[in-house]
Amino acid sequence: MKNKPKKGRSILKREWVRPLIALLVLQLIFFVCDKNGWSMNFRDDEGTVLDRFSKAKFFTEQFIPYENPTFNLFTAVFLVTLLPAAIIGAMKDLFSRKQTNHHAG
């Protein structure tokens, strides 16, 4: 019998890909909603913490991937929470692979 090389895990089954996919799906949803003029239906958000943060200068003048400031706020929150998890997971995966390949040879 021929020796078949071992196949690694599928890219979709790696832990660091899930936060990245979640981030991309959320951005796609925000993009579609923003381009169609749809917005989230909050009960009277005037004066709430969400309203104050979304109307902050950073989300209305500097970080503006979307016209809706609430989408900008949520994008920033998701970037801060999901992107580091994906980067750390990818680096762990990369370094564990290098270490395994280094010891195997």
Image (cartoon, rainbow, N blue to C red):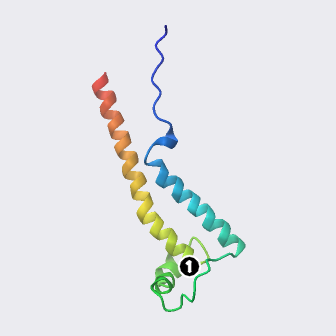
Is residue 55 toward the left or the right of residue 38 in the image? left
SS label for mark 1 = helix
* Disc 1: which residue: 69
Question: In this view, which residue lies farthest toward the right?
Answer: 36
Instruction: Residue 31 in the image: state x and y as whole percent.
Output: 63, 66
The residue carrying pointer 1 sits among few (fewer than 14), some (14 to 19) or many (20 or more) residues within 10 Å by Cα, namely many
Above or below 3: residue 79: below
Instruction: Residue 55 in the image: state x and y as whole percent.
Output: 51, 85
Above or below 62: residue 78: above
| Mark 1: amino acid | Pro
Q: Residue at x 39, y 55 (%)?
A: 85
Question: In this view, which residue lies farthest toward the top?
Answer: 1
Look at the image and tell me in which quarter the C terminus lies.
Answer: top left
Instruction: Residue 6 in the image: state x and y as whole percent.
Output: 45, 24
Q: Residue at x 51, y 71 (%)?
A: 74
Question: In this view, which residue lies farthest toward the left?
Answer: 103
Question: In this view, which residue lies farthest toward the bottom?
Answer: 47
Above or below 60: residue 22: above
Is residue 2 toward the left or the right of residue 102 in the image? right
Q: Residue at x 33, y 37 (%)?
A: 96
Image quarter for residue 93? top left
Give the number of marks. 1
> Along the line of sight, which residue is nearer the eye, 9 or 66?
9
Instruction: Residue 24 in the image: state x and y as whole percent.
Output: 56, 57
